[in-house]
Image (cartoon, rainbow, N blue to C red):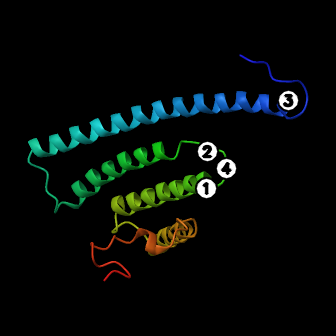
Amino acid sequence: MAELPRGGPALNWRPHLWYDRFERVVIHVVTLLIVIIVASATVHLAVAVALLLLTNQMNPANEQVFQTVFGMIFIVLIGLEFKHSLPVGSAGAENVVRVRTVVLIAVLAMVRKFIILDLHETETGELFALAAAILALGVVYWLVRDPAPASHHALPLPPGEGRGEG
């Protein structure tokens, strides 16, 4: 390995190399932990659904079964989304992507909360607070959205129907 010249920016760069390595190790460890947690949650979900099917209790009209199963599904989805928030970039647009992912995870957690919420036991003030929180998260998600114009996401026109073709 070539030795870095003494003095100048190289002195400031060397600690960043160690920190970058440390950060990558931490990300790999956290990724492994998330994989274990998501795999465990998926197994528990599969076992719960199988038991409900085998005991003939899988009735979507049963509010408690619906809340339990979809609450477990959202736990798996939130775990998967956490994994997507881990890659750490240097600066700029990659940080915005991470903010969007974190806000998306918060929205998923709020949706899960709404699904498992017992409306008979919940007070009106708590419902308004939860609704305000999800509205605020939606606004934040919109504020950090992809700055590309809407036409960038439009479907392509069929051949012969493009602009200026004739």
* Rendered location of residue 24, percent (x, y): 59, 31
Circle 4/circle 1 CB separation < 8 Å: no
Mark 3 to mark 4: distance in Å?
21 Å
Crowdedness of circle 1 by 10 Å Cα count: few (<14), some, many (20+)? few
The residue located at (59%, 28%) in the rendering is 25
Front position in the image: 68 or 139: 139
Q: Are marks 2 and 1 in contact (CB under 8 Å)?
A: yes
Report the residue at 57% width, 69% height from top.
143
What amino acid does circle 2 point to?
A: Gly
Circle on res. 89: 2
Q: Which residue is mark 1?
A: 93
Q: Which residue is mark 4?
A: 91
Give the residue number, with chain letter if any, for mark 3: 11
Question: How far separated are the C-alphas under marks 4 and 1?
Answer: 7 Å
Discs 2, 4 touching: Cβ within 8 Å: yes
Seen at 48% across and 58% down, the residue is 104
Alpha carbon distance from label 1 to label 3: 28 Å
Kindly state the secondary structure of the residue where label 2 is placed. loop
